[in-house]
Image: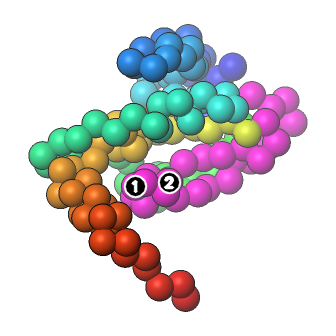
Amino acid sequence: MNCPRCNSSLSKEVINDMNASIEIDACNSCGGKWFDKGELTEIEKLVEPTFIEIRKIPKRKEQYAALSCPSCSNMQLLEKVEHPRDHKVIIDYCPSCKGIWLDKGELEAIKEENWFSILGKAFKWLIGYEPESI
């Protein structure tokens, strides 16, 4: 499989956390990561609280560049979707095989959340706050 960003060969990488060990495909050239269907879900459950969150993700223009799925043989284009936890992270999603491409730094941005955000969410949960629907 080749990287959808720079076309280099992807190599196997193991991500270990407290709950699971997941083997993904990673690009040693650009630092992107390919997650087969369901692999990212396990990692997204973890939140790493930080005092200050410093994102090191690509610029929006680069995030919105068209990419083809590295897994599908029919050259399926990946769709762009904002990540629900971090709206500055644009994930690339394959509607055919359900795989997900994350550019360098996007996985860390998804996993990290600053203490102020966590405390704000906890406070809203405690008081039963629900945002108004549009």
According to the picture, the residue beneath numbered tag 1 turns out to be: 86
Name the element at disc 1: loop
Percent across and percent down for residue 14 are 48, 12
Seen at 53% across and 84% down, the residue is: 133
Q: Is residue 47 left or right of residue 93?
A: left
Residue 55 in sight here: no
Percent across and percent down for residue 129 are 37, 75
Percent across and percent down for residue 106 are 41, 41
Residue 64 in sight here: yes
Residue numbers of the magenta segment: 71-97
Seen at 49% across and 57% down, the residue is: 84
Label 1: how many residues lie within 10 Å, few (<14), some (14-19) or many (20+)? some
According to the picture, the residue beneath numbered tag 2 turns out to be: 83
In this rendered view, identify the residue nearer to me: 132 or 44: 132
Q: Is residue 21 left or right of residue 111?
A: right
Q: Is residue 121 rendered magenta in the image? A: no
Q: Residue furthest front?
A: 127
Residue 18 shows which numbered tag? none
Name the element at disc 2: loop
Percent across and percent down for residue 64 are 54, 57
Amino acid carrying label 2: it is His
Seen at 69% across and 32% down, the residue is: 37
How many marks can you see? 2
Q: Is residue 113 left or right of residue 46?
A: left
Q: Is residue 102 above or below residue 78?
A: above
In this rendered view, identify the residue nearer to me: 121 or 74: 121
Q: Residue furthest bottom?
A: 134
Q: Is residue 51 above or below residue 70?
A: below
Q: CA distance from mark 1 to mark 2?
A: 5 Å
